[in-house]
Amino acid sequence: MQKEYKGFIFDLDGVLVDTAKYHFLAWKRLASELEIDFTEDDNERLKGVSRMASLDIILELGNKSLSEEEKMDLATRKNEWYVDYITKMDATEILPGALEFLKMLKEKGFKCALGSASKNAGLILKKTGMTEYFDTIVDGTHVSKAKPDPEVFTLGAKNMSLSYEECVVFEDSVAGLQAAKAAGMVAVGIGESSVLTEADMVVKDLSEFNLNML
């Protein structure tokens, strides 16, 4: 590491665990009830997007318009189904290289933060046994602005008592990478380089990443 990085901030879905499949199952179930055709391609549009904004996209697909009250009821129902799926998660669902990398960072004395839009982040970390590796958890219950606004990452840095320039962010969504760059942080993309064009570097998963790359 040429520069002195001290903190590492991780998005959750698609970086540490793959909960996207459970979001998809829950949204598809809701869309079916509304008689809206919802495909995996449509689901790509929901990556890194808040629950209410995701519902708006689905309603738009079905050309449906509902009251705010009806939308709140539907979003709550979707989340209940999603929580039901994730309560059955365990450590086998941690993505390749993630646990090893977190353990190494902790052993070397680096600080780690979670920076996720998910309101269920704490539950997922607990179910997969990763809670102990994080100095701070910033999730959807702590922030009012969604990515690409950098709030979730700037709050993570603040909670670790670090400057933004001392932090490295790991993200699998375009909006998340934009948020990291807006905060002046190094942005590592997890996924496909053809999609994650705003990243400083891209790896398939955390098993491909090492500190010498910084």
Image (cartoon, rainbow, N blue to C red):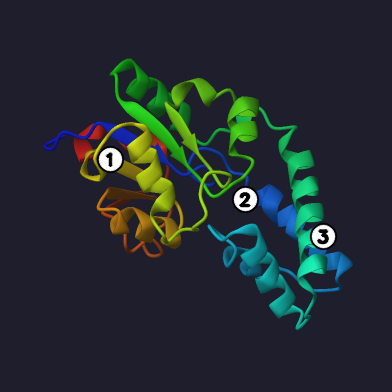
Image x and y of residue 209, in percent: 32, 38
The residue that mark 2 highlights is 20
User: Image quadrant for the N terminus?
Assistant: top left
Disc with the residue nearer the chain's start (3 vs 2): 2
Residue at the spot 34% in from the left edge and 38% down from the top edge: 158
Quadrant position of residue 176: bottom left
Quadrant position of residue 73: bottom right
In the depicted structure, whether residue 56 falls above or below residue 172: below
The residue that mark 3 highlights is 73
The mark lying in front, picked from 3 and 2, is 3
Amino acid carrying label 3: it is Asp
Image x and y of residue 188, in percent: 33, 48
Residue at the spot 56% in from the left edge and 61% down from the top edge: 49
Image x and y of residue 111, in percent: 33, 27
Task: Look at the numbered disc 1 and give the secondary structure of its residue.
Answer: strand
Residue at the spot 32% in from the left edge and 62% down from the top edge: 198
Quadrant position of residue 2: top left
In the depicted structure, whether residue 100 falls above or below residue 195: above
The answer to which of 190 and 148 lies nearer the viewer is 148
Disc marking residue 167: 1
Q: How many marks?
A: 3
Q: Residues within 10 Å of mark 1 (few under 14, many from 20)?
A: many
Give the alpha-carbon distance from disc 3 to disc 2, as whole Å: 22 Å
